Image (cartoon, rainbow, N blue to C red):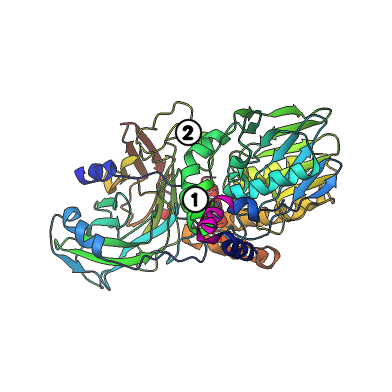
Amino acid sequence: MGRLAAGLAVAALLCAPPPVHSQSAEQADQPSEKTWAEIKDNIFNGITLEDGSGLVALETPLRAEDAAIVPVTMRVTLPEGDPRTVKRLTLVIDENPAPLAGVFDIGPSGVTAISTRVRVNSYTYVHAAAELSDGKTYVVKNYVKASGGCSAPASKDETEAAANLGALKFKQFSAPDEASEKTREAQIMIHHPNYSGMQMDQVTRYYIPANFVEELKVWQGDSLVFTMNGAISISEDPNIRFTYIPNGADHFRAEARDTKGRVFKAEWPAEAGAM
Amino acid sequence: MHITAINKIACAFGALALFLFASLGHAAATETPLPVKQIAPGVYVFEGAVALMTSANNGAIANVGFIVGDDAAAVIDTGGSVREGRRLAQAIRSVTDKPVRYVINTHMHPDHVFGNAAFEKAGVTFAGHKNLPRALASHGQNYIDKFRQFLGEALIAEVKIIPPSLLVTGEMSLDLGNRPLTLRAWPTAHTDNDLTVFDNATGVLFAGDLLMLQHIPVVDGSVRGWLSALNALEGIKASQAVPGHGPVVTNWPEAIEDDQRYLSLLARDVRGLVAKGAPISQAASAAQSEKDRWGLFNEYNTRNATAAFAELEWE
């Protein structure tokens, strides 16, 4: 993921919510596709992008309450009987210092939706792209009003954040998705500050080295559910909720690696309701 | 008001004088002492507006105050702009000749620390929670950038982030001359750098934003931590409490109940959402029953609920 590394090189700060809510003062920024036009060929290797309307849904708040934790869902809804599957979901936050927020390579577990939380630095278009098994990439966009999400650390409790670094948690939701009786949802969470490399340690006066979760893999038994390649636009404590089709495996496992090379692993039994 | 004054001077001295006056003398000509009230012998408080920080209100939305001892005075929070800080300094000079020896910041938020530069001079020591320097280092520039659009360039240009050099872990006593103050650093609650100040002579407790009245509590630390801090705060035998926002209260500790109720409801509702597997995007439905009880509810409740969700989903 060289592009992610390149994005990091120009990445701005980690993100923390300022204590006062964005007020009515509107930013002058109007929705613009200018940035998208400049970055899309680099992100998607110049391939032709298809209009994903009706196929890909992108759920974002129009106005984010906390620019450091902006909930985003990418969802692919294939017509009944359509044999195509989802190969990759890509999330781009156009105006962020590192626009490529996350790339999710989908394994054979039938993932059709990914939700996560991102930092939004300024009013921006957010693009979701779904590469399907037909080899085509389908794109949709939303405009999100949020700012400041990438310009300060997110930790509300920096001591606790350091103490819990790398702790993983897995949740399995028993309620089936309305789209398919077979589909289940689960959520993987990891305690990690996702440091950007632009923050100064007040004591040492040195910048805290960049350190974020760059790869996160989840398996159902031995079958890969997805691999996330992430960067600093993913909020502190990366949190991925996803749909999947149970394959009968009796356990899930996850492995995360941060940019310091630290690896965090955990395993959980599959719950009855989730199987 | 200052427009009239400027016009008169413009007539008398011409355009050059106007320019000099406007650029050099503006602050002195228009700033009056902050209207503080004495709530106990030697204890003075200015109650900020329950509002968001704007250029019109000079960022003066938090309660600020000072305590005067036999030898010196201590300032407790400096307000949301250097202009407010200077007005607070004028208010101090209007009631005492004693020098300001300490400036105590109750936590990192801009409405409490942006006035610090008004007090920066030899002989003044800034005091705060042991985590405050770290918090200001990581958030300070972001606050300046973020609040430029609300306060305007003129107010923001003066702001200087000044971290404390006197750091409090647990409890610390400061003496202003027969006037011992007890500073107490709290575990993560409203923020991870909350500090309270207790005036032993009068029993007045400056609670900082651990106590927010009329202004909806803002969770920028830990909802669980804040609830347990409130339980401990309740045990302090105070004659009066100065909240970070809202009126000074004498019905202590009953006054704490509003915050306890809101935060308990927020935690209960968010836990309910987490338990039924709701996504974080539905967090906003939490604590809606509190809507009519608080100022700025719409501005902060969803944020609080989102923050609480991100905290409580780890339980």
Q: Nearer the viewer, residue B54 or A56?
A: B54
Viewer-side residue, B101 vs A228: B101
Is B13 placed above or below B192 here? below
Image position, residue B264 (x, y; %): 67, 53
Secondary element at image label 1: loop
Up the image or down, B242 lies above or below B171; here it is below
Quadrant of res A190? top left
In the picture, measured across the screen, residue A260 lies left or right of residue B91, that is left
Tag 1 residue: A17
Task: Give the left or right position of residue A35, taking residue A48 as reference.
Answer: right
Residue A16 appears at what percent x and percent y? Answer: 47, 47
Magenta stretch: includes residue A156: no
Q: Residue at x 45, y 64 (%)?
A: A63
Q: Is residue B276 visible?
A: no
Q: Amino acid at mark 1?
A: Pro
Label 1: few (<14), some (14–19) or many (≥20) C-alpha neighbours in 10 Å: many
Instruction: Please state the extent of the stretch shown in magenta in the rendering.
Output: B14-25
Q: Are the residues tagged 1 and 2 within 8 Å (C-beta)?
A: no
User: Label 1 is found on which chain of the structure?
Assistant: A
Amino acid type, residue under disc 2 in the picture: Ala
Q: Nearer the viewer, mark 1 or mark 2?
A: 1
The answer to whether dots 1 and 2 both sit on one chain is: yes
Residue B268 in percent (x, y) is at 63, 55
Q: Tell me: B68 left or right of B17.
A: right
